Amino acid sequence: MKSIITGIRALITAVTLTVTLTAAVFTVPRVFGYRPYIVSSGSMEPTIHTGAVVFIDTKDTDVEKGDVIAYQMETADITVTHRISGIDEKTGDFITKGDANHMEDLTPVRREQIIGTCGFQIPMAGFLMAGLDRKLLVVVAGWLVFLNVLSTVLERIV
């Protein structure tokens, strides 16, 4: 019986560590000014795939041609991640284009719209993040705490 409880405790500990490390990957970068965004289109393929989570360096807004940036669209509450393909000499606005797109974006990007540059990405992690909501995360965290406490109690009783 004791070996079963020890095995269950090891499994619960492994799951807890996995969940904790996964949460840390998405929260620790925020301390350093990186904000995660889920990529929902293939416009930056093959550089950034659909479903990736890109971490945008919000401290790096001093951008130039060739940089991959995230910017807020003016007409909608949408964040776009595209590459700067040029700079309008008259206005100083940035011309952007998705790597997979054949044409440049129709609307230039003003400096105020820029959130930052693409720091790093985690491929396919966006599919996982998109399926999670705060209520589910609270329930999972609650269950993990409960299971850890229960396994500790059972291990001491037996």
Image (cartoon, rainbow, N blue to C red):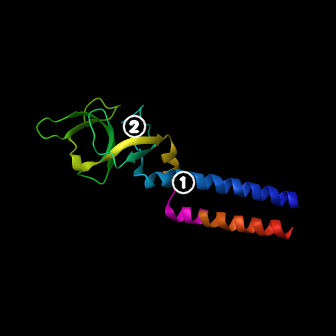
Q: Which residue is mark 1?
A: 24
Q: Is residue 13 visible?
A: yes
Q: Is residue 47 above or below residue 151?
A: above
Of all residues shown, which one is farthest toward the top?
Answer: 102
Using the rendered view, name the quadrant where residue 100 is placed. Answer: top left
Side of 135 relative to 115 (left or right)? right
User: Which residue is pictured at 56% across the width and 65% down the height?
Assistant: 138
Horizontal and vertical percent for residue 114? 28, 47
Using the rendered view, name the quadrant where residue 62 is placed. Answer: top left
Q: CA distance from mark 1 to mark 2?
A: 27 Å
Does the magenta-highlighted stretch encompass residue 50?
no
Residue type at numbered disc 2: Gly
Of all residues shown, which one is farthest toward the right?
Answer: 1
Q: Which residue is mark 2?
A: 42
Q: Secondary structure at mark 2?
A: loop
Does the magenta-highlighted stretch encompass residue 133?
yes
For the record, the magenta segment spans 132-140
Picture quarter with the C terminus: bottom right
Q: Is residue 121 above or below residue 155?
A: above
Q: Earlier in the sequence, mark 1 or mark 2?
A: 1
For marks 1 and 2, give the one nearer the viewer: 1
Label 2 neighbour load within 10 Å: few <14, some 14-19, many 20+: some
Horizontal and vertical percent for residue 141? 60, 64
User: Which residue is pictured at 41% across the width and 42% down the height?
Assistant: 119
Foreground: 93 or 97?
93
Side of 12 relative to 1 (left or right)? left
